[in-house]
């Protein structure tokens, strides 16, 4: 039976990547700051809509990722074992 | 001057924006792939593990959608940058040519006027030559204006094509609803106008404006929280309420100090204005990095991003490094051995360092404003409470019990 092992530091790395991405999403600035560079046409407002028109999902996703990141770092001292596609617990597991 | 307008915009900044969008899209896509492998390749046991797995299920598709939205804009923006580059070169040349033609026409007109002043007529050869040269300058100006108009039109077409692509990308499952936009807009405007209240000492007439806007913003924030479930409770909460959100003291303290810096002269200044939610996120990142670094130190893993396991997308797992099973006690000893200090002098020195650190952080939080101060106090209170609870728990715990988080 094949066993795939993820060590604690790797889970912690994943947690940091999740938390950093989440924070980046929460910290997105005012998209109108980009508008001056785009010229006088319709692209400026379109870019504003593209970058700023999903605020609700952005905040929710940012919150989820920071939460997942925190949880993954918290789980960084546990092993995740997978046997034939079935892993042992990430949380509440034992060493 | 010709009066012809230049073509505003910065092609390099547009390319930079496209590059940033591609980088972000790739990062989100890679993260989504890692989460998908974890989601599909692991079976979670226990309520916490199942909750974690369920959240992975929810997050990965959203990451993919965001990646598509942002990454899809890059080709269109690069096309616009190219068109802008070409159009600006033509427009700038046309403006210059028209200016020169108009200046030359004026110089020729001065010479013609001088000839007329000494008795020359329009049929005189010298004046005929001048009029011919003037007509050439007028024609040169017209050609330049036509080039300007054509380049501007080409740019308008490129701009319209780019905007169409971007608008198409913006119509997806991520887009905000109209009611949400209205409430979020009121919140933003309210907070902006509310800053007028800060000017009250020098402009008393602005005080009621600021107060009214503040109330408006508060109402909108409450609507965002209640109607849309937006996790911005901290914006409305006191320090005590923050602690009820379940975040750790370290996260609160780290978030409270985010954005404040010391200058070379030792003065503390706040460089950014952050919401409570943003501070909490930065606090989580700070704490996550600290814990990750502690793990790296204890496990002696080479620094750098990336995952090496097959499950997370890397090569086959490394052989186990410690030979034999790792026990909770062994891990605790390994982590603790590097930091444990003995002796009264060491304790006193450590206490002094902690006090200095607390005061330093408190100054940073103070620079960030009252909201950050409340967050910092809440975090410090939580940490003191957790430490006291931990000592009490340790004192009453039977041998061999406990778990490691």
Image (spheres, rainbow, N blue to C red):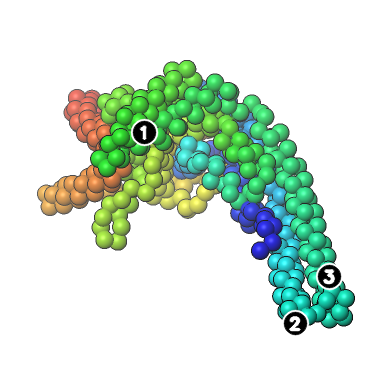
Mark 3, residues whose alpha carbon is within 10 Å: few (<14), some, or many (≥20)? some
Q: Position of residue B368 (x, y in %)?
A: 31, 42
Determine which residue is flagged by label 2: B118
User: What percent of the width, then of the height, locates residue B192?
Assistant: 41, 36
User: Which residue shows up at 69% across the image and 35% down it?
Assistant: B167
At a point 65% along the width and 49% down the height, the residue shown is A39
Residue pictured at 58% horizontal, 32% vertical: A53
How many residues crowd around disc 1 within 10 Å: few (fewer than 14), some, or many (20 or more)? many
Report the residue marked by disc 1.
Answer: B194
Which circle, 1 or 3, is nearer the viewer? 3
- The reply, left or right, for residue B392 in relation to residue B80 is left
Q: Can you say which quadrant of the picture contains the C terminus of chain B?
A: top left
Lower sequence index among marks 1 and 3: 3
Q: Of B47 and A60, which appears nearest the observer?
A: A60
Whole-number angstrom distance, CA of label 1 to CA of label 3: 61 Å
Calculate the distance from the C-alpha at mark 2 to the C-alpha at mark 1: 72 Å
Chain hosting mark 2: B
């Amino acid at each position: 039976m094949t066993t795939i092992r993820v060590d604690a530091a790797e889970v912690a790395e994943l947690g940091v990547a999740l938390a950093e991405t989440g924070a980046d999403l929460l910290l997105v600035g005012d998209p109108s700051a980009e508008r001056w560079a785009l010229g006088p046409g319709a692209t400026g407002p379109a870019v504003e809509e593209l970058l700023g028109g999903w605020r609700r999902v952005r905040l929710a996703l940012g919150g989820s990722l920071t939460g997942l990141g925190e949880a993954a770092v918290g789980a960084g001292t546990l092993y995740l074992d997978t046997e034939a596609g079935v892993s042992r617990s990430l949380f509440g597991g034992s060493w | 001057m010709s009066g012809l307008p230049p073509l505003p915009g910065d092609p390099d900044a547009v390319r930079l924006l496209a590059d940033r969008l591609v980088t972000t899209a790739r990062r989100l896509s890679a993260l989504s792939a890692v989460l998908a492998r974890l989601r599909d390749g692991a079976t979670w046991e226990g309520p916490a593990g199942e909750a974690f797995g369920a959240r992975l299920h929810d997050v990965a598709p959203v990451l993919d959608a965001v990646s598509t939205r942002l990454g899809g804009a890059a080709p269109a923006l690069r096309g616009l940058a190219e068109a802008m580059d070409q159009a600006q070169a033509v427009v700038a040349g046309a403006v210059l040519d028209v200016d020169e033609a108009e200046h030359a026409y004026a110089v020729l007109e001065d010479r013609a006027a001088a000839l007329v002043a000494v008795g020359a007529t329009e049929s005189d050869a010298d004046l005929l030559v001048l009029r011919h040269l003037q007509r050439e300058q007028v024609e040169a100006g017209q050609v330049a204006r036509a080039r300007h108009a054509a380049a501007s039109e080409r740019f308008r077409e490129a701009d319209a094509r780019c905007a169409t692509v971007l608008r198409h990308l913006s119509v997806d499952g991520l887009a905000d609803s109209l009611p949400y936009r209205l409430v979020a807009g009121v919140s933003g405007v309210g907070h902006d106008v509310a800053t007028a209240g800060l000017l009250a000492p020098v402009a008393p007439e602005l005080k009621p404006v600021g107060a009214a806007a503040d109330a408006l913003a508060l109402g909108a924030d409450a609507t965002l929280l209640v109607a849309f479930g937006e996790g911005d409770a901290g914006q409305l909460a006191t320090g005590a309420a923050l602690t009820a959100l379940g975040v750790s003291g370290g996260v609160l303290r780290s978030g409270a100090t985010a954005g404040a810096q010391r200058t070379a002269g030792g003065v503390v200044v706040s460089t950014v204005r952050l919401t409570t939610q943003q501070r909490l996120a930065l606090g989580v990142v700070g704490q996550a990095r600290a814990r990750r670094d502690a793990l790296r130190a204890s496990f002696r893993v080479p620094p750098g991003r990336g995952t090496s396991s097959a499950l997370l997308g890397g090569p086959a797992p490394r052989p186990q490094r410690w030979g034999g099973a790792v026990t909770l006690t062994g891990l605790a000893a390994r982590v603790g051995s590097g930091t444990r200090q003995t002796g009264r002098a060491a304790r006193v020195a450590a206490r002094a360092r902690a006090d200095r650190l607390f005061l330093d952080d408190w100054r940073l939080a103070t620079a960030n404003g009252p909201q950050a101060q409340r967050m910092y106090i809440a975090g410090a209170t939580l940490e003191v409470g957790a430490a006291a609870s931990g000592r009490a728990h340790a004192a009453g715990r039977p041998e061999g019990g406990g778990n490691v988080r």
